[in-house]
Amino acid sequence: MISIAITGGIGSGKSYVSALLQKQGIPIYNADDEAKRLMLGDEGIREGLMDLLGNEVYTDGNLNKPLLASYLFAGAENAARINSIVHPRVKADFRSWLKAHQESEIAALECAILYESGFEDTVDFVVMVYAPEELRVERAMRRDNATEQQIRARIAAQMNDEEKCRRADYVVFNDGSIPLERQLADLIAQLKTRK
């Protein structure tokens, strides 16, 4: 089995690329969705977050997202504390998921903060989904019903796309210049030759 990561900045189209790959029969582990699930159900994460932020980080069994977000975005040190609680559990969960999908020829991890979270070592190859920043801002504003300022702040908080492209094994361009389906067919063919 070949394991790949799909990464890219906000509004780049990672989820769309993942959905296209899933239609090709490639199982996808969405790190964002699974982190949310684990933050609710994993006892180690729950204890770590309550130790850090107090019992009010969970209300009626649900995550107190405004409290978590206000702490998380107050500074890099705070984000690092949260990440040190959540990321190791997500990484372990992904590794278990991969074992359960060993019969697949290719399996994929969708992860926006792949490099920032240190997840690049969990896969064989990294695929970066790239789109120009202006297009990403426009897409994310429409998708999230957010202001340009909010989206640009999120972009600024992530590793820049040029650095991600430099580190990635493959780059998929999601700017309309080359059909995604053709790029993904080429990608899958290349991956199968690298087994």
Image: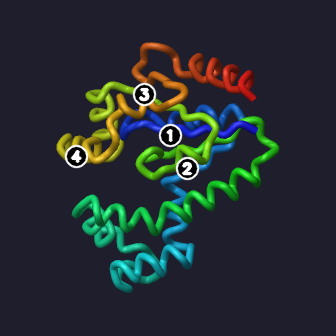
Q: Amino acid at mark 3?
A: Arg
Relative to 164, say whether 149 is above or below: below
Q: Secondary structure at mark 1?
A: helix
Residue where numbered disc 2 is placed: 30
Helix, strand or loop under label 3: helix
Q: Answer left or right for 128 relative to 21.
A: left
The 10 Å Cα crowd at callout 4, few under 14, some 14 to 19, many 20 or more, is few
Q: Which mark is residue 166?
A: 3
**Mark nearer the N terminus (2 vs 1):** 1
Q: Which residue is mark 1?
A: 15
Expressed as whole percent of the image width and height from the top left, the position of residue 71 reads: 27, 68
Place of residue 55 in the rendered image (x, y in percent of width and height, measured from the top left): 38, 86
Q: CA distance from mark 3 to mark 1?
A: 21 Å
Q: Residues within 10 Å of mark 1 (few under 14, many from 20)?
A: some
Quadrant of the drawing holding the C terminus? top right
| Residue 46, placed above or below residue 108 | below
Q: 190 or 35: which is nearer to us?
A: 190
Q: Residues within 10 Å of mark 3 (few under 14, many from 20)?
A: few
Q: Is residue 145 visible?
A: no
What is the secondary structure assignment of the residue under circle 4?
helix
Q: Are marks 2 and 1 in contact (CB under 8 Å)?
A: yes
**What amino acid is found at the position of numbered circle 1 in the picture?**
Ser
Where is residue 105 shown, x and y percent of the image? 77, 36
The span from disc 2 to disc 4 (Cα, nearest Å) is: 23 Å
Image coords of residue 8 (percent x, y):
43, 36
Q: Residue at x 50, y 73 (%)?
A: 45
Query: Which residue appears at 48% of the width and 38% of the height?
Result: 7
Where on the picture, by quarter, is residue 181?
top right
Q: Quadrant of the N terminus?
A: top right
Which comes sooner in the sequence, label 3 or label 1?
1
Label of residue 153 in the image: 4
Tag 3 near tag 4, CB within 8 Å: no
